[in-house]
Image (tube, helix red, strand yellow):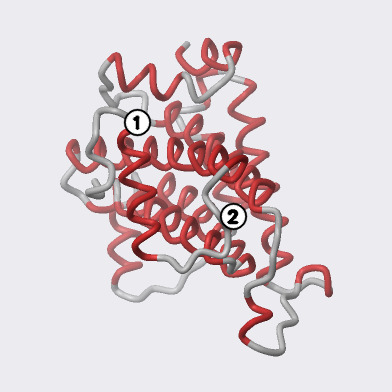
Amino acid sequence: MSNIFKSQNLDKDFITFQEALNKTNIQQHEISGENKASLKRYHRLTYIIALFENKLESKWKEENRFLFLNELLSDLLANCSLSLIGFQYSSLIITRRLLENFYNHIYYFEHPVEFELLNLGRNDYTSIVELKKYYESHPFVKPLLDNNIKIFNDQVFAHYQELCKTVHSKGEDFMGLAKNIKEIKPEYNLVNHFTLINQSTQAIIYLLFKFHRDLKFTNMETDLIAKTFTKPLRGSLLS
């Protein structure tokens, strides 16, 4: 687990997290007011992803079972820095990547041979829509009869599709169109930007919790994960 995710107290860990950001970034956006509230939410969700990654890496020696989740965590950390510096389009591209890494984690978790071939340079590509279907049809998930699984899976996939428009420059609304370095760092609504990323990360946490039913969490850890959701969703999550 990253060394900024060691504290048992989430608020203390956020202070460390913010200090790390202040040391590494020339920030375009202030960490105050609504920006700070949305960043605290981002930190909480990233913290929980780090918790999942730590549990998996402690339980399994095989890298196919945790490495893509490690990379998803790395994407979230890099994404936070890019967002605060002001590189919105770069942030959108890495957000798409972290959604891909979620689906890759699910697929390669039980495909060690394919993971080894991937490391040897095999360039096969499975579409994200197929990986989305793979999640819902997985024996770990299919028997659960949880409507929220489909809702959150659809949400992650819809966000991925929207981000593809930026990655592939599908029209001028999805282009940066900078002509000099200064224009690469425009002002934009950081709260709205983080809200969309937070919604997808929350959905991923729900889907991970349902997929990894065999992971053991302490009561405090389970409470931390559950309180990320509204009360009606908590019951569904823990059932």
Q: Secondary structure at mark 2?
A: helix
Side of 69 where 196 appears, left or right: right
Q: Earlier in the sequence, mark 2 or mark 1?
A: 1
Residue 7 image position (x, y, % from top left)? 24, 34
Q: CA–CA distance between discs 2 and 1?
A: 33 Å
Q: Residue at x 56, y 35 (%)?
A: 203
- Which mark is in front, 2 or 1? 1
Q: Residue at x 44, y 41 (%)?
A: 43
Figure quadrant of residue 22:
bottom left
Q: Secondary structure at mark 1?
A: helix
Residue 54 image position (x, y, % from top left)? 25, 40
Residue 182 image position (x, y, % from top left)? 64, 82
Q: Nearer the viewer, residue 80 or 154?
A: 80
Q: Residue at x 70, y 73 (%)?
A: 168
What residue sits right under mark 1 in the picture?
A: 10
Residue positioned most to the bottom: 179
Residue 26 image position (x, y, % from top left)? 46, 69
Are the residues at dot 2 and dot 1 in contact (C-beta closer than 8 Å)? no
What residue sits right under mark 2 in the picture?
A: 128
Check disc 1 and give the amino acid type.
Answer: Leu
Residue positioned most to the right: 172
**How many residues crowd around disc 1 within 10 Å: few (fewer than 14), some, or many (20 or more)?**
some
Marks counted in the figure total: 2
Side of 101 where 19 appears, left or right: left
Q: Residue at x 59, y 55 (%)?
A: 128
Side of 101 where 233 appears, left or right: right
